[in-house]
Image: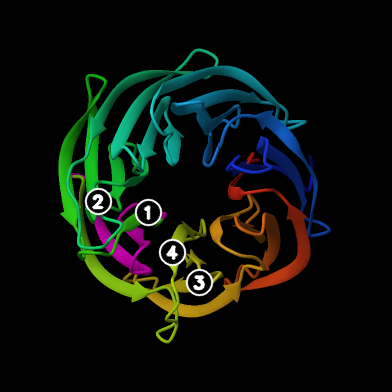
Amino acid sequence: MGKKYIGYAGTYTRKSSKGIYRFTLDIETGTLSHVEVAAEVGSPTYLSISEDNRNLYAVAQQDQMGGVHAYEADRETGSLKFINKQLTEGTPPCHLQVHNNKLVTGNYHKGEVELLHVKGQGGVELASSIHHEGNGPHERQEKSHVHFSGATPDGKYVVVCDLGTDELATYQIENNKLEHVHTLKVKPGSGPRHITFHPDGKTAYLMTELSSEVIVLDYDSEQGRFTEKQTIRAIPEDFTETNDASAIHISSDGRFVYTGNRGHNSIALFRVDEASKELTFVEHTSTGGDWPRDFTLDPSEQFVIASNQHTGNLVLFARDVETGKLTNTGSTVDVPEVVCVKFLGE
């Protein structure tokens, strides 16, 4: 599409949303446009696109069942063709990620991680699941709440963030099952939510939802272990209202880390030290809406798109690749109950 990229927005369907929405980002004009329903499905709150850009996977809910829908994505038009689904009794996952023909999901309400095989043309089949047990001191930590599950950059492990138990757990896949390798216990009541890795493959950045902090971690790929090296706040010291930190992403050059704040309604920018990989706070940018559940860098990394759930809008920011700073372009489109955004790549 030249200077245009196809994006997909995952949503809740509690009110007016129909499912997965498709839109266009024009990086020459710096505008978002052409929002339309790409697939009708119940609460596809999180999406993942395969490395070859051929398939899209979505969290899905159908009556009292929850799980995953698999689609074939047309790289020219962005249209989605349903392939198959894998649903089980109970609430749907809140996160999923596909990597090397394996798909893992994290289920907040069940405290569960599922491993699925990607078959043939991109369909999915359940292989195994594990349940977490435990709790924490915060009122929202009455039990395990798995909020993220995804592959480490080297593909050797699956890493799981458990908001309910303040744990970061590492697993390896053996005989189609997840086998426990290591668990890092972080500050009680912090609530690990999402994690992202530095391109060097040796450093990770863990976002905590309840304490609104970023924990910088050394990652030992030989043993699948994490150790803490720095903790830094993602919201101002004098902000006393409720804030639930959300997403965390890093630029592909490894120079800047961005985090989302629901309540403060901002994206925090951090500069990465080239030697230590530790973070220095730079600034906050308003997301132009309420409750930024997620945000993402576009494939060119010239822009960042914030998804504000409560105001139901996507807001486009120009990104200075030298300073990392964001500027609101004024381009915004309505997407009801929006949660996350993913793009078809180059």
Is residue 124 highlighted in magenta? Answer: no
Three-letter amino acid code at the position of disc 4: Ala
Foreground label between 1 and 4: 4
- Report how far apart the C-alphas of labels 1 and 4 lie in the structure: 12 Å
- Which of the 4 image quadrants contains residue 153? top left
Q: Residue at x 37, y 40 (%)?
A: 150
Sequence-first tag of 1 and 4: 1
Residues tagged 1 and 2 counted as in contact (Cβ below 8 A)? yes
- Report how far apart the C-alphas of labels 2 and 3 lie in the structure: 23 Å
Task: Tell me the residue that label 3 is attached to.
Answer: 268
Label 1 sits on a secondary structure element that is: strand
**On the picture, is 345 further left or further right than 249?**
right
Specify few, some or many for label 4: CA neighbours under 10 Å numbering under 14, 14-19, or 20 or more: many
Query: Which disc number belongs to residue 147?
Result: none
Foreground label between 3 and 4: 4
Question: Where is residue 327 shown, x and y percent of the image?
Answer: 68, 72
Three-letter amino acid code at the position of disc 1: Ile
- Return the residue found at the far bottom: 238
Sequence-first tag of 3 and 1: 1
Is residue 218 highlighted in magenta? Answer: yes
Image vertical order of residue 85 relative to residue 189, above or below: above
Image vertical order of residue 199 relative to residue 117, above or below: below
Sequence-first tag of 1 and 2: 2
Task: Tell me the residue that label 2 is attached to.
Answer: 168
- Report how far apart the C-alphas of labels 3 and 4 lie in the structure: 10 Å
Sequence-first tag of 3 and 4: 4
Foreground label between 2 and 4: 4
Q: Residue at x 65, y 65 (%)?
A: 289
Question: Where is residue 160 shown, x and y percent of the image?
Answer: 30, 44
- The stretch of residues the image draws in magenta is 199-223
Residues tagged 2 and 3 counted as in contact (Cβ below 8 A)? no
Task: Tell me the residue that label 1 is attached to.
Answer: 195
